[in-house]
Each structure stands twice: as C-alpha cells, then as structure tokens.
Image (tube, rainbow, N blue to C red):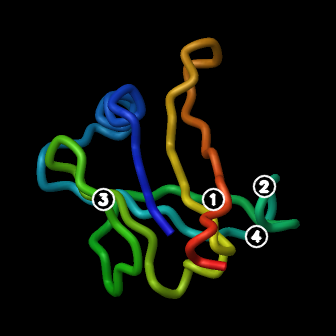
Amino acid sequence: MELSITKPAVQWFKKEMGLDQGDFIRFFARVGGCSTVQTGYSLGVSKELPMESGLSTNVDGITFFVEEKDLWYLDGHDLTVKYQRKYEEITFDYKKNLAST
C-alpha cells in the first residue's frame, strides 16, 4: 500500500490546519460517513504525533501517516489525497494495489 499527497492538497492542509514543517497529520478510520473501500466508515483527519505508524509520507516537511491499527481500512488500496479546486476541499482516491493482494 502507498500513501501520496499532491502538492495542492499539502497547501490546503497548511492553510486549513495551520501546519508548519515538522507537523504530523494522521488519517484514521472513523465510524459513519461514506467510503468506497469500507461500508459504514470514512477517513478522519487529525493533527497529532504518530504512535505506531504503519504507512507514511513526508511532503514539504509535513508527515502524513496512517497508524498500523488503521491499515485495515485501506483494504489493500493505495491512498492519494488530492485537492479539488471546484469544491475547495480535499478528496481521497483509492486504487487497489495489486502487489498487496
């Protein structure tokens, strides 16, 4: 599984969450919402330090990660976080990782 964040998405995070270099953003499974990979769950976002990172990437000095305990949510999919200009929000794109099946 891979985690990637586009540059426009990083800029959105910096603006919306007041991020600086050295900050950490966690993606986690939460009950409720809508997802194409897990029925009845969605992806949450919070600014916090990692406890047991299972998947991470660093862009512009900011580390984005998924804890080991939340990897089940991705169900073998790569996650790409993008910024959608039309709606001025981020989106989560999931693509099945054939190497993890």
Near-viewer residue (4 or 97): 97
Q: Residue at the spot x=51%, y=47% of the render?
A: 80
Q: Earlier in the sequence, mark 3 or mark 4?
A: 4
Q: Residue at the spot x=38%, y=65% of the render?
A: 65
Mark 1 touches mark 2? (CB < 8 Å)? yes
Image coordinates for residue 36, horizontal then vertical, percent: 80, 55
Q: Earlier in the sequence, mark 2 or mark 3?
A: 2
Horizontally, residue 99 falls left or right of residue 41, namely left
According to the picture, the residue beneath numbered tag 4 turns out to be 31
Distance CA(mark 4)–CA(mark 2): 11 Å
According to the picture, the residue beneath numbered tag 2 turns out to be 35
Distance CA(mark 1)–CA(mark 2): 8 Å
Image coordinates for residue 12, horizontal then vertical, percent: 39, 29
Image coordinates for residue 25, horizontal then vertical, percent: 36, 57
Residue type at mark 2 is Ser
Q: Earlier in the sequence, mark 1 or mark 2?
A: 2
Number of the label disc, if any, that sits on residue 43: 1
According to the picture, the residue beneath numbered tag 3 turns out to be 57
